[in-house]
Image: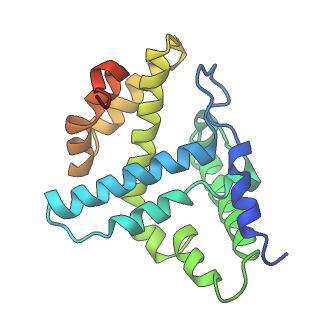
Amino acid sequence: MSDNFFAYISRMRYIGRWSLMRNSLPENIQEHSHMVAVIAHALGVIRRDVFGVPCDPNEAAAVALYHDASEILTGDLPTPIKYHSADIRGAYQQVEKLACDKLLATLPDELRPAYEQLLTGETQERLHDLVKAADKLSAYIKCIEERKAGNNEFLSAEKQTRAVLEASKLPEVGFFLEHFIPAFELNLDELGTIE
């Protein structure tokens, strides 16, 4: 079983997201994880350079790259089910931990500690708030993109996600919302191209 880790990770592209919603722009967890890593890195830079709080943006990006790795084995459980009750959430957290442990077991012993920090360790816990915020921002961006594609299926999710983001206690989230989210409303011509 050892040495299968990266073959499993490459299978992230087969796990679809938003399974209960009609998608104009399908998204898999590999694409999602990339965007979450980009945003987590940005939030880390904002934390460090705007608010003066020590943070390693590269570490935040690495944790974000693997934040949904357990879903390779569990699939993506829809949010309304995952958060329906404390019992379901607790049971799902146990399943996620089991899946992460199984993935870690597919690494050579020498590499396991480094990836354990990203999947379940102290590094993952320390940066959980930034990665969770990046995950929520990524979901919000997905909702904006679906609305812009003419898909009204995501309107309620967009409104709910925006409310959660606006209620966030993280100043990095407010900064990102103010400075970067408006550009997601623009088309390519409005964003500008290389001339």
Q: Identify the image quadrant of residue 144.
A: top left
Which residue is at the front of the view, 156 or 18?
18
Q: Position of residue 168 (x, y in %)?
A: 28, 44
**Residue 81 falls left or right of residue 182:** right
Which residue is at the front of the view, 74 or 106?
106
In this picture, is 104 found above or below 73?
below
**Which residue does the image show at 61% across and 22% down from the upper left?**
23
Can residue 32 be seen? yes
Q: Identify the image quadrant of residue 188.
A: top left
**Which residue does the image show at 76% across and 62% down from the upper left?**
7
Quarter occupied by the C terminus: top left
In this picture, is 8 found above or below 173?
below
Can residue 169 be seen? no
Q: Position of residue 157 (x, y in %)?
A: 47, 25
Q: Residue furthest bottom?
A: 110
Q: Position of residue 54 (x, y in %)?
A: 22, 71
In this picture, is 20 found above or below 54?
above
Q: Residue furthest right?
A: 1
Q: How is the image coloured?
A: rainbow
Q: Identify the image quadrant of residue 55.
A: bottom left
**Which residue does the image show at 63% across and 36% down from the upper left?**
17
Quarter occupied by the N terminus: bottom right
Q: Position of residue 36 (x, y in %)?
A: 46, 49
